[in-house]
Image (tube, rainbow, N blue to C red):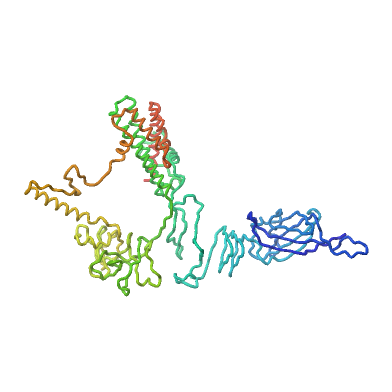
Amino acid sequence: MKRILILILLVFNIFLAEAQTEGITYQAVLVDNNPDEIPGVDVPANSLANQPLSVRFSILNVAENTEYQEIHSTETDAYGTINLVIGRGEVTSNSQGAFDQINWDGPKNLRVEIDLEAGTNFTEFSFQELTYIPYVRHRNIIADGDANVMGNTVLGGPTDILDRLTVRDTSEFLNKVTIRTTPQQTDQTNYESYPLQLESGFHGMAIRLNQINPGRNINYMSFWDGNGNAIGRVEGFRAFTDISGNFLLQFIKDSAFGDDDVENQNDEDVLEAPPLPSAFQQYLNNDYGLNYFLEYTDLLYTSFQFGVNLAPCIATASVAGDCDDAVWAGVDIVVQGLQLGAFIWYNEANKGVAFESGGADYAEWLKKYNINEKFAYGDVVGVKAGQISKSFIDAEKFMVISKDPIVSGAMPQESKKDMFKQVAFIGQVPVKVIGQVNKGDYILPSGNMDGMGIAVRPENMRVNDYRRIIGVAWDEYHGNDLFSYINVAVGINSNDLVKEIEKMQILINSMQSAITEMNPNYKPIFFETGTTSFTSKYRNTSKSKPMRQLVMEKYGLDKALTPSEALQKLNYIMGENDEKSVGFSFSELPYLKEMIKNPSPENIQKFNDEYAILMKGIDNIMRSIN
């Protein structure tokens, strides 16, 4: 009996299963057009029920070259139906790659072959064009016009959308996406001017980087101009997570010269410093890493001094007074260790982003006193009740029109922008200044209501000039032009009246001295000045106790303690810190705790030998840096 298999139903369906397995559903009913005949009975076609079979699917390109092929071993159900998923079969050696690697860009054909003899005698069952991309994970797709995707979409390769992409459900891009548009609108206030538009009922855009602690070298967003020049970025605010004392200790130790190396040199000062490895150069290019290194080397140096001073103190069984240097060095280790721990904790605990740009000032939009008045960057303006004008002679404050603010606050409505102008509040800004300028000069308004400034030396300032200060010149000009643009620091000169106040205090003190000579019963109250302190009660400036003294008072350290008692105190302080600290542990300093607990000559010698090597390493590193 010869069986002819007829396809009753064929269904293709794009789907993404819960397990994120991609594929094409395929369904068919198989019947036998030549069933067993019963004499005298007209038998219709029968379905092939419970029939084992193999099905081979081949996806071919327009040249009919096989790009993907797989085989399914299956069985029809009681109604002769098979339900398969193209993409879940056994991939054959004829495939150019896996199913999820098919490049769907271009026409594709599907060949279906069926075998009822255990996969050894395949017969072509159907051959037809795939008129729709049957795959949710699109790769290397270029949409010349509108692209509409109706279901969950995962774009897994470089994707160029040359017009409008509409996705009706969740979409995921697994590689680079480039959006190229020819803008129909250029107005920055027009929503349709922007090629990337995010619309949401609540939040907007979220950016997550795979870096656990992105630092300054990791950018969340960067900006370029049309010439390919980087003009700004939003970058991380954390340094390297691999910073550790153990790393630095090993690096410093590896950087030390051996004794043989030193003996072979006529002058140790001319030893050529070893090159710094790239891993350590990252520390030097980062504020956190560099300061960590410098703080840590200071701590190692203090520890070295502690060991050097402790050795003779213990060896001679000296009284406490003879061991002052050792005790002080021990206290300094505690002070520096506490500061280093706080430094590490702060840097590790604080994270965020930083905006970096060529702009150099913070500005705000201030309202014009006269809406028709024209302003240009660098113009000096007076401010009255939040309004600006070049014509103000007496103003609450004199400021300058910003050029390229890095941040601009109080943005008005677009329709009212002509009524406002950006004014620099703090930072660096160019100012139009008449005549010669020296660095450090005060910049004042010219007084001619012309938007110009003038430069005045600090020693030539008058009392009434201080309230007219715009800023301090950080540039100089000695040419012949009538005016020049001078880089001026604005918003940071809050201590400028100190000198004038000190002059008045000196004068008042002098007057009180004269009154005292005429009237011995007069009790003067003298003012402190920069050079004079009249009584022991007053000091030139307010100050706190040194950290060394605060530590000694807090923990009961006293010069009267014996060396043994002082070491016990130091051991207790370091242990207490190590239990609480999350940034630094005194236990990581080589042999320190061991020597403090048991200051034997052997332990002290082992400590001093170790730190002598570390001092060599630090010296070599410093010469490499410098």
How far across and how far down the image is residue 89, in percent? 71, 54
* Residue 432 vs residue 571, the one in the foreground: 571
Q: Looking at this view, name the residue that lies furthest to the left.
A: 518
Q: Looking at this view, name the residue that lies furthest to the bottom.
A: 372
How far across and how far down the image is residue 374, in percent? 32, 73
Residue 208 shown left or right of residue 586 in the figure: right
How far across and how far down the image is residue 464, in percent? 20, 62
* Residue 219 vs residue 259, the one in the foreground: 219
**Which of the 4 image quarters holds residue 65?**
bottom right
Note whether residue 267 is visible: no
**Which of the 4 image quarters holds residue 144?**
bottom right
* Residue 404 vs residue 52, the one in the foreground: 52
How far across and how far down the image is residue 271, in percent? 38, 39
Residue 607 shown left or right of residue 44 in the figure: left
Q: Total marks drawn?
A: 0
**Which of the 4 image quarters holds residue 129?**
bottom right
Note whether residue 10 is visible: yes
Q: Looking at this view, name the residue that lies furthest to the right.
A: 39
Residue 146 shown left or right of residue 191 in the figure: right
Q: Residue at x 15, y 51 (%)?
A: 506
Q: Where's the N terminus, which quadrant?
A: bottom right
Q: Is residue 368 above or below residue 97?
A: below
